[in-house]
Image (spheres, rainbow, N blue to C red):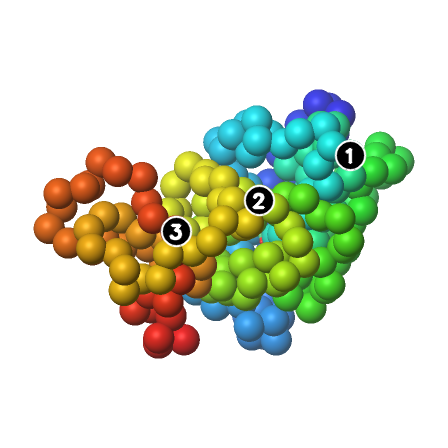
Amino acid sequence: MKEVIRRLAARTEENRAQFRGGFAAFAARHDLSDWEGWFSPYDDIHALVLQNIEKCDIVLDLGAGDLRLALRLAERARRVYAVEVNPVVLGTALSEIGFDLPRNLHVVCANALDVAIPPGVTVAVLLMRHCQHFGEYFGRLQAAGCQRLITNARWKSGVEVIDLTRPRVPFEQVQEGWYACQCGAVGYVGQGERSESPPIEVSGCPACQKL
Ligand SMILES: C[S@@+](CC[C@H](N)C(=O)[O-])C[C@H]1O[C@@H](n2cnc3c(N)ncnc32)[C@H](O)[C@@H]1O
């Protein structure tokens, strides 16, 4: 599998399909704005994602790009569903992978927001720094009984593992500290006295009111 991933990585520039004619209309059709539809692999944080995957997990990789992470996830987890909207990125990747595609990796070319969450998904991966639909993903995953969400979409760097089963604190109850909301917004309330404390998982933040 290392060799397949090396070949995929070698085609990264060619696969940046956002620079091709027709991409703008495609992105508009799928409501992908502000770089949300841009393919750019996050090799630097894939190892962190893999550390948080158990053998028994059923993984949903949302915005799977050229499948280089999905292939590694499939080596670790019970099953992986990889959903990628861009047919040019995915088509090139699948032809490169060829008959090395593992049986426990199920690949779907579609807008992830149009696809039902497969039954039994325990953890979702959303590596999409420019995600404009975080709240929708969060709500759909929670409703489907998914337990964890591994993402860089809220804080934009590194990855966080969000426990989707935990109750959220209503925003108005937060007096002081960092917060991270289920709509995708993050921020700080107060004067900076608790700036070292971990963020509080909230619902109903000021950004939610604007949606
Ligand atoms: C920044 S790239 C990251 C690719 C991959 N997750 C990685 O870490 O290497 C984000 C990918 O998400 C895809 N994407 C964005 N919105 C999507 C959607 N609604 N449904 C499926 N894929 C989407 C883009 O086409 C792009 O390939």
- CA neighbours of label 3 inside 10 A, class few (<14), some (14 to 19), many (20+): many
Question: Residue at point 54% right, 58% down?
Answer: 138
The mark closer to the camera, 2 or 1, is 2
Mark-to-mark CA distance, 1 and 3: 29 Å
Q: Which residue type does callout 3 highlight?
A: Glu
The mark closer to the camera, 1 or 3, is 3
Question: Residue at point 66% right, 54% down?
Answer: 145
Residue 201, x across and y down, in percent: 39, 51
Q: Secondary structure under badge 1?
A: loop
> Does ligand 1 reach within 8 Å of label 3's beta carbon?
no
Classify 93 as above or below 208: above
Residue 201 - label: 3
Observer-nearest of 20 and 54: 54
Residue 78 - label: 1
Task: Indicate which disc, 2 or 3, sits on the residue closer to the N terminus.
Answer: 2
Q: Which residue type does callout 2 highlight?
A: Arg
Mark-to-mark CA distance, 2 and 3: 14 Å
Residue 127 shows in this picture? no
Picture quadrant of residue 189: bottom left
Question: Residue at point 49% right, 45% down?
Answer: 162
Q: Which residue type does callout 1 highlight?
A: Arg
Task: Indicate which disc, 1 or 3, sits on the residue closer to the N terminus.
Answer: 1
Residue 120, x across and y down, in percent: 75, 48
Mark-to-mark CA distance, 2 and 1: 16 Å
Observer-nearest of 57 and 159: 57
Give the residue at mark 2: 148
Locate residue 159 relative to residue 111 in the image: left or right. Answer: left
Task: Indicate which disc, 2 or 1, sits on the residue closer to the N terminus.
Answer: 1
Quadrant of the rendering where the C terminus is positioned:
bottom left
